Amino acid sequence: MRLLYKYMAQPNLLLKEGYIRATQLSALNDPFEALYCKKNLNELSASFEYCATGKELLDYIEKNKNKVGIISMTEEKDNLLMWAHYANEHKGAVFGIHTEMSGDISMFENLFNLMINSTTCPTYKTKIFRGKCLPVIYRKQPRYRVDKFDFDYSNIEVEGADRLLFEIFQQKSDEWIYEKEHRITLRLEQADKVLINDIEKMNKNVQKEIKSLDCCSKKKENGKDVYTIYLNKIVDTVDREYYAESLAELAKNPDNLYLFKLDSSAICTVLLGHRTNIEDINLDSTYPRKTGYFEIWETKVDESFYTLQFEEISSKL
């Protein structure tokens, strides 16, 4: 098993139902995300044993990069900058999550595999967007700028353009190296649950169909209608992918949420920030406790050094 950490401003979403957000490009905090050298990729594509032209590959990436989501993890649970930036100034929490389970068990409860909106050959044994957590590559230049021949593209014929769409999200400027980030890169069409703030921008007919689904509900938030759709409750996989594709088209709105359900056994611990109000969190009936193994820790400020201390409080609750 491999344990990594997830900093979260609002821990209740994961604690109550086991859902974690895959953040779309429009909501990521680095304007250089998914930046790549188009000229060099176009040149590199000439060496591919693949029927698409360089222009077709670039068009595919540009059309679909806003429909990719990132779940960011880290090796460190006590980074002061990340506690401030990603855990709501120490009012949030950090979760310990097993990103690699024993055997072939996934960290996700049931990750949806795309069949229609995928360039990967159906018979290829390894899916590109398969929920694998990989370390970020830190470089001085964007992808393909100086490293276009550093990677093996011998399987590009069966991986297709999704291979390129995936890997542009795996590289960042070395200014971010302190985060020691690992990423799970997914297509938003794979989401189990979505919260949509601007459903009126969808095709009217598809919008009407989605609103009529039993797994769709509406509530008012700040005077706006917010629709929650549980895609994982749609039994027919073709229907699910059809609706998911339309919902992913709305990802340019950073307020729309695309959520994935983790297996309860993957969530092994939570570290509550020293400013977190424990009374706001119902820790007795949390989703991770379904397995019977879930540690709860409280964070304290070390007054002798610029460090954090952790005290287990599981037995006190």
Image: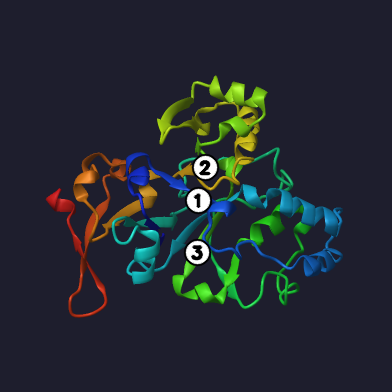
Q: Which residue is mark 1?
A: 104
Q: Quadrant of residue 49?
A: bottom right
The residue located at (50%, 74%) in the rendering is 177
* Amino acid type of the residue tagged 2 in the rendering: Asn
Mark 3 and mark 1: Cα distance apart in space:
20 Å
Q: Which residue is mark 2?
A: 256
* First in residue order: circle 2 vs circle 1: 1
The residue located at (40%, 60%) in the rendering is 86
* First in residue order: circle 3 vs circle 1: 1
Mark 2 and mark 1: Cα distance apart in space:
32 Å
Q: Secondary structure at mark 1?
A: loop
Above-or-below relation of 299 to 174: above
Could you say where residue 262 lies in the image, as x and y percent from the top left?
Answer: 43, 45
* Amino acid type of the residue tagged 1 in the rendering: Asp
Q: Is residue 187 visible?
A: yes
* First in residue order: circle 3 vs circle 2: 3
| Mark 1 crowdedness (10 Å alpha carbons): few <14, some 14-19, many ≥20 | few
Q: Which residue is mark 3?
A: 182
Q: Secondary structure at mark 3?
A: strand
